[in-house]
Image (cartoon, grey):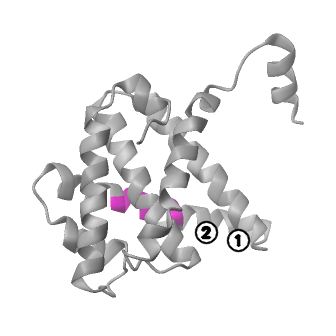
Amino acid sequence: MTSSSLLNRLFGRAEPREGLRPLYAAIVAQGRQPHWYVEGAVPDTLDGRFDMLVAILSQALIRLEQQDAKQESVWLTELFVDDMDGQLRQEGIGDVVVGKHVGRMMSALGGRIAVYRAALTDGGDLGEALKRNLYRGDAPSQAALDHVEAKLRDRWVRLGCLSRDALLAGDLG
């Protein structure tokens, strides 16, 4: 246990990011649903799972941005970074290289947020954004692409109907 977490426990101060853990857990659970990898033909690989998680995380971060929840967005991103750091270490990536990998992941997240924001809010082409970012240029069948696009659009609409509190609680439906 770190000294700061010990002090927090002794003096009753909760880590503020912990309030975002239900939302992050819901995002991860959504990204692990088999339909993405079966009907949607998202590659069931480390990269494919990362890309799917980032697609869903991007939607949540954009909705938090729209709800003026900037600090919560930062905390959610920090939970993602912590998770990715842990995943890399679990895969055997050493301390010296983890930071570089996490940096590339953060760069990918930032770029994808911009692309998905344009596709979802500015009338961009979500299908093209998915081909480039989720499928990394290796486009699946039209049926698979349609499946993923429809499910992500449905989630986008659902997220737009949630109150800030419901979103923060991880009520992704």
Instruction: Give the left or right position of residue 146, taking residue 79 as reference.
Output: left
Are there few (<14), some (14-19), or many (20+) residues within 10 Å of tag 1? few
Instruction: Give the left or right position of residue 161, taking residue 92 as reference.
Output: left
Reading the image, the residue beneath label 2 is 101
Secondary structure character of the magenta stretch overall: helix
In front here: 70 or 139? 139
Residue 143 appears in which quarter of the rendering? bottom left
Residue 154 circle label = none
Which quadrant is home to the N terminus?
A: top right
Expressed as whole percent of the image width and height from the top left, the position of residue 119 reads 19, 59
Task: Give the residue drawn at x 44%, y 59%.
Answer: 54
Q: Amino acid at mark 1?
A: Val
In reply to whether residue 111 is colored magenta, the answer given is: yes
Q: Are marks 1 and 2 in contact (CB under 8 Å)?
A: yes
Tell me the SS state at disc 2: helix
Q: Which residues are magenta?
A: 105-112
Tell me the SS state at disc 1: helix
Instruction: Give the left or right position of residue 4, taking residue 83 as reference.
Output: right
Q: Amino acid at mark 2?
A: His
Disc 1/disc 2 C-alpha distance (Å): 6 Å
Tell me if residue 20 comes above or below residue 7 in the rendering: below
Expressed as whole percent of the image width and height from the top left, the position of residue 152 reads 30, 57
| Residue 107 visible (yes or no) | no
Expressed as whole percent of the image width and height from the top left, the position of residue 77 reads 51, 45
Task: Give the residue drawn at x 32%, y 43%.
Answer: 62
Reading the image, the residue beneath label 1 is 97
Task: Give the residue drawn at x 34%, y 55%.
Answer: 113
